[in-house]
Amino acid sequence: MLQYFAKHHNKIQFFGYEVANLVLVAQQLWFSDGPGYGLNAETLAALSLLLGSAFIWRFDPKLRPHLLFYGGIALAFGGVFLTVAGYVWTGLSVVLASLETARGGRCVLKSWLDEQQSVSGTVPLNAEIHGRVATWSLGWYCKIVDAVISLYPNLGRFINERPFITSTLIKAPLRLEFIGKKLLVGDWIGAGVGLSWLLLGDLALTFNDAQLQAYAQRTETHYPLPDLTTEQARA
């Protein structure tokens, strides 16, 4: 099972997140009998999550370095809309995990801008604007993270070195709020969406982690789980 997830994690993640989000949008629009034609907070959450995923899918560290940042911001708005829809803990966990994605995107964009400045001495105006937007909009959050890392360096090292596992640890347990509330009102489709997020999307997301992938590929030969020291020695 681990090897299958490691080999096909991108496809599983796509199905677990994006197909589930499309199902949620379709359900809200199709079965809505209230005002607004189903365009409510849940629908906006799913659309924001789809938009964020589309940005991240189009992200390229050399050609489109800004899209990881914008993808994280769009995902964070999805979490905000989930919170407004009444799924407070699920929504807040998505917001936090998505801000971490945006923080990583901000670092990627800053590195690209610094590289362009050192190589050519100039930076394209649109890229400079993206950099200013990232710095202005996320500076407050980065200061909070830096303060936490300075207080708990081991935790900070784990957050920075294992971002995909960190994201899953933040989001996955609190998906249960969304699933539970859907079950309580008899919304089996919504509960299925939450289970898809949890069991397919979040689980497959962890297999973007290089060390976990290496472990999954070695399970048949019973190699131990590699740590940072062994990976550095191997390099």
Image: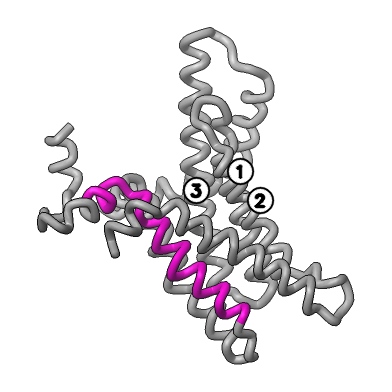
Image coords of residue 118 (percent x, y):
47, 12
- Circle 1: residue type: Phe
Q: Which residue is at a point 55% across and 66% down the rendered structure image?
A: 92
Image coords of residue 68 (percent x, y):
54, 41
| Residue picked out by circle 2 | 51
Residue 101 disc label: 3
The mark lying in front, picked from 3 and 2, is 2
Asked which colour scheme the image uses, the reply is one colour
Q: Is residue 171 above or below residue 60?
A: below
| Element under disc 1 | helix
| Residue picked out by circle 1 | 55
Give the quadrant of the C terminus: top left
Q: Which residues are magenta?
A: 189-214
Describe residue 71's horizontal placement relative to residue 25 as left or right: left
| Cα gap from disc 1 to disc 2, whole angstroms | 6 Å
Q: Which residue is at a point 67% across and 63% down the rendered structure image?
A: 45
- Circle 3: residue type: Thr
Disc 1 and disc 2 in contact, CB within 8 angstroms:
yes
Query: Dividing the picture into quarters, in which one does residue 187 lie?
Result: bottom right
